Image (tube, rainbow, N blue to C red):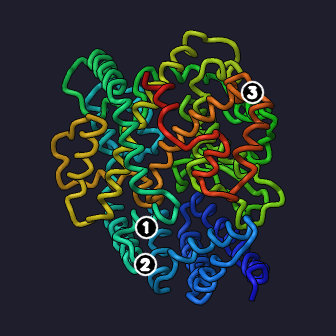
Amino acid sequence: MKFEEFLKDFVPVVARKSKQLNKAYWILETTGSSDAADLKADLDTELRFLFNDPKIYEQLLAWEKEPHDPIAKRQINVLIRAFKQNQIPKQLLEEMAQKEAALAQSYANFRPELDGKKLSENEIRDILKNETDPEKRKKAWEASKQIGPILAPQILELVRLRNQSAKALGYSDYFQMQLDLQEVDSKWLLKTLDDLSEKSEKAYESVLSQIAQRQSQMFGTKELGPWSWSDPFCQEDPLDMKELDELVDGVDIAKASSDFYQNMGVDVGAILDRSDMYERSGKNQHAFCMNLDREGDVRTLNNVQPSIKWLETVLHELGHAIYELGFEKDLPWLLREPPHMIPTEAMALIAGRQAYRSQALKHLIGDQKEDLRNKADLSLRRRQLIFSRWVLVMTAFESELYRDPKQDLNQLWWKYVEKYQKIHKPENRENQFDWATKYHIGLAPVYYFSYLLGEMFASVIQECLIAECESSALNHPKAGEFLQKKLFGPGNRMSWSALVEHVTGKPLSSDAWVKEFAT
């Protein structure tokens, strides 16, 4: 059989099953339904089984050695990596699919309890943003960790299964396997993250000092714990957030975001029509973008509140969405996706930054509140430095989690929080499961580094926009045309690192990000 004949038979089957799975996943994340969880697990298993045939895998390896045009060679590469991770016993594939679906259902349905009342994640964040009593803040922070003991056993079982699958394929652990299958060199990754950390350390320490001084004034004490921050993981800028929320008073966040993208020359109306925008019981409390069929059904899930964070989030998720709709029309189905999450995160992140850029805010909320818009500019720099440290925590922890899941994981978690974020572990956190409260640990594994590499790429894109469009403005037709042609259009024609060079003319490094935020 020729490769082209194989594609003709194989791809329609995979496309159909993928669409069914994505629909079930959407229902699960928007309802928390146990029926949807069961269906998602079954369909996920069936899709994985399609990539399980060892004879097809061997044939792909043979085709890889033959001459093919670039599009065919890239499809072979994509398929080899998809098949490789599924060359394990079917029972193991099925068990992982079932446990991931159950874990997703647990996340969707859990609500922490505080003083006898169940709270949403938005409500916990509101307390951390507005409450001035340190003890009440501490209780809210501790409530946010209640999910840990519930999820930790499920996550550890998944870690065991994931490592089992990786070792069956010759890898030391699942973390290393995923880096390889994602075309990310582990030595380069660690060196790049260390380089960024070193070059921005002084800037971060300066921000941390500023935050500590302001928090001490706000709460009347120097004995501050992680609950003095505005989010449970200390990954966001805690200063001026309540005040910055005034920027979106009376603003229809969905409409403002839609108008912003319209100025880029992109209509996101159909995306928003399909999206699920507001919180309710049983629904995933996070945010994400989904391409259900690679045929145009792109939608986002949000839990919008009138806050600058949710303006940023809606812009961010729509950034993913326009990327997914921007692939060249003649690309084959297998290549209608980003080559990695790094470039699509870059687009989403540069879009989310607009919620904190004074000039962009003029178009989002109107030409008013100049003082607040200038404060947002300052907040953006702090946010970048703070978030960079959170990514370092997550990446280091995940690497160690999969290397040795039997170690004291909560101690390991706080070790990295103290090392990178320089936030001390509170008393009485021994024998807790704080590490398990972060959504990505269980359900988006070996992903978090993509955010920081995406931020680095976003800063280089920003430089390119200034050079190509003679403006740093994102909401401009020239910016839309540049991104469409250079970033979105190629889809998965090439590796993510080759795409970075295609867009920017140079390999990815931390230089532009450091110049923008750490000098």
The crowding category of the residue bearing disc 2, from other C-alpha atoms within 10 Å (few below 14, some 14 to 19, many at least 20), is some
Q: Is residue 330 left or right of residue 388?
A: right
At 56% from the left and 83% from the top, the residue drawn is 52
Tell me if 14 is positioned left or right of 411 in this view.
right
Q: Secondary structure at mark 3?
A: helix
**Where does label 3 land, which residue?**
469
The kind of residue tagged 2 is Leu
- What secondary structure is found at the residue carrying circle 2? loop
Residue 358 falls in image quadrant: top right
For this view, does 381 lie left or right of residue 354? left
- The CA span between labels 1 and 2 is 9 Å
Q: Earlier in the sequence, mark 3 or mark 2?
A: 2
State the SS at label 1: helix
Q: Amino acid at mark 1?
A: Met
Picture quarter with the N terminus: bottom right
Name the residue tied to disc 2.
169
The image quarter containing residue 233 is top left
Q: Are marks 1 and 3 in contact (CB under 8 Å)?
A: no
Closer to the camera in the image, 142 or 178: 178
| Kind of residue at badge 3 | Cys
Closer to the camera, 24 or 417? 417
Q: Quadrant of residue 29?
A: bottom right
